[in-house]
Amino acid sequence: MGLGSYYSYGLPSFLIIVIALYLLFTDSGEAFNVGRFLEESNPYAWGASGIGLCIGLSVAGAGWGIFVTGSSILGGGVRAPRITTKNLIRHAHKPSENRLVTNIALQYHLLAADSLLCISRHKIIGIVYSARLSSVGEAELYTPANYYTGFALFWGGLTVGLCNLLCGVCVGITGATAAIADASDPDLFVKILVVEVFGSILGLFGLIVGLLMATNAEEFKAAATTTAKAVASPYVF
Amino acid sequence: MEALFFNIDTGFLEGIVRGYKAGILSQNQYGSLAQCESLEATDYGGFLANEPLPLSTSTIQDKATQILVDQFNYLRSNSVQPLTKFLEYITYSYMIDNIILLITGTLHERDTHELLERCHPLGVFESMPALCVATTVEELYQSVLVETPLAPYFRECLSANDLDDLNIEIIRNTVYKAYLEDFYHFCASLGQPTAEVMQRILAFEADRRTVNITINSFNTELSKEQRAKLFPTIGRLWPEGNNQLAKADDMDQVRAACESVSEYRTFFADAVPNSSSGGNGYDELAAASQLEDRFFRMEVFLNKQAFLQQFQYGVFFSYVKLKEQEVRNLTWIAECIAQDAKDRIQDFIPIF
């Protein structure tokens, strides 16, 4: 075990144990109350975090994928300039180039479209989810339906964000390989493109699951009567 | 996981080196070369344009090597650590050759400038001319080598005091052994898949040197203990094969020692089964050159395989070796044409 892992695994564990034992021995063990935390925390916080995570992680994935592919395209394009247009720009590929293509109109690039897809997915989620965030006063906020909306937005956003992150990385790596394979043998381009499309589907699945989670989540509504937050326990300072 | 971060520092250079690899002459181009046509359409387009006729083989070799050197310097100047260190490791083997060349040349009283011109350009370092004045290894080390990155490799040979021909070969092999082992461990520290690719190539290099040292030391003054100390402690023949080769006296024992590794068995397959050692010198020579040929083919094969994997540094090493092989091929073809030996012109090793 290196010194780095001593610190990175040991220090947090130590701190957690110390805090837990402190609470236990000062008779405040009840302060660690997960249910109370979930009931007390504001559904807006959950919802907004979910949306933020979705957008942030998706952009990170798209960016990661772009730089991985981009550097390989730049390097390979020095010797084989033809790969830059095919791999970078999203347009139908010019019939003047003598290449074997299955369907010229559908000759997609790799990089830009897939990153754009990543970005467009999170925009969809962002728009759909933020429609749920309507304004409700503090006293009427804590209803079961609102709790559900908050949690659903958080975990849905996290799901979409992580899926897009991994999808972006996947497409980026296969794109780099595709660029280099294309530079050495043009016939390989379409074959590797198929693999990339499979990678792209990962993000799509994330989008579907995110949307499903949000279908039952209604927008925040005020309660009929004023509802109280969870009662503070007498065992807690 | 290496694919996640490799392209940050090295993606562009990897693309460049794969582009260079696409410029290596193919079998068709060799075919047209052998018929004396021009090198115009290849990477070598203009390199001979400014040379006065008649072209000598050494000019062709020098200019072709210069192309490799220019490409390598481009890669090295654009690299960051740890790729820079890796590329420097590649130059160390040429440095070792240059140092030995200079020492040998000085011993035989050759002209310093002539020697410096014959040095390989990839292995030049600043204090090289100072090597020509040293007389013992101690002096050599203290004055020149201690500042070069090769210093740790020379420490083991400080005991060989007088520099005669046999000792120089021993020094060369001891230093090269230290270099190979150091490079091997450095590649291990770079993580997978660089380690996997490079260690396979370096293991074969070590085995090849072991076998060559053994075969070349038959009927010489080199004792078996001295021979054993020159074998690198990496490679698939280590440790059992190395022990057997240290005690070997003729080709049959060498073949027996290599039996344990399946790839090396075929190297000795067609050799004339010559039971009486030292009997028929010509057969042994033919067997040795066939063996050398097979080693080269295996090396080219392993270097080509390195290109099948992405996101590792092995492609840089393999490109340099393949380009070197190509220069050797070109020199061979030029020599055959010059000496009018067209029947042997196909004896080079094709790469792609």
Image: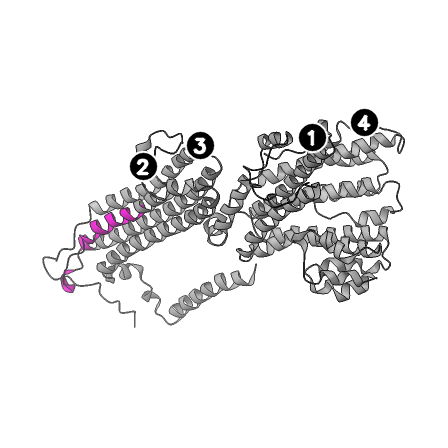
What chain does badge 2 belong to? A
Q: Amino acid at mark 1?
A: Ile
Q: Which residues are magenta?
A: A118-146
Query: Residue B299 falls in which quadrant of the image?
Result: top right
Looking at the image, which residue sits at the far left? A224
Front: mark 3 or 1: 1
Residue under label 2, please give it.
A92
Disc on the earlier residue, 2 or 3: 2
| Residue at 35 percent of width and 66 percent of height | A29
Is residue B58 toward the left or the right of residue B158 in the image?
left
Q: Amino acid at mark 2?
A: Ala
* Badge 3: residue crowd in 10 Å (few <14, some 14–19, many ≥20): some
- Tell me whether the residue at label 2 lies in contact with that at label 1, contact meaning CB atoms closer than 8 angstroms: no
Mark 4 touches mark 2? (CB < 8 Å): no
Q: CA distance from mark 2 to mark 3?
A: 17 Å
In the depicted view, which residue is nearer to us: B59 or B345?
A: B59
Q: Identify the residue shown where x is 58% and y is 32%.
A: B29
Chain bearing tag 4 is B
User: From the viewer's perspective, is residue B298 above or below residue B101?
Assistant: above
How far apart, in angstroms, are the residues tagged by discs 2 and 1? Answer: 48 Å
In terms of depth relative to the viewer, which is nearer, B137 or B130? B130
Q: Are marks 2 and 1 on the same chain?
A: no
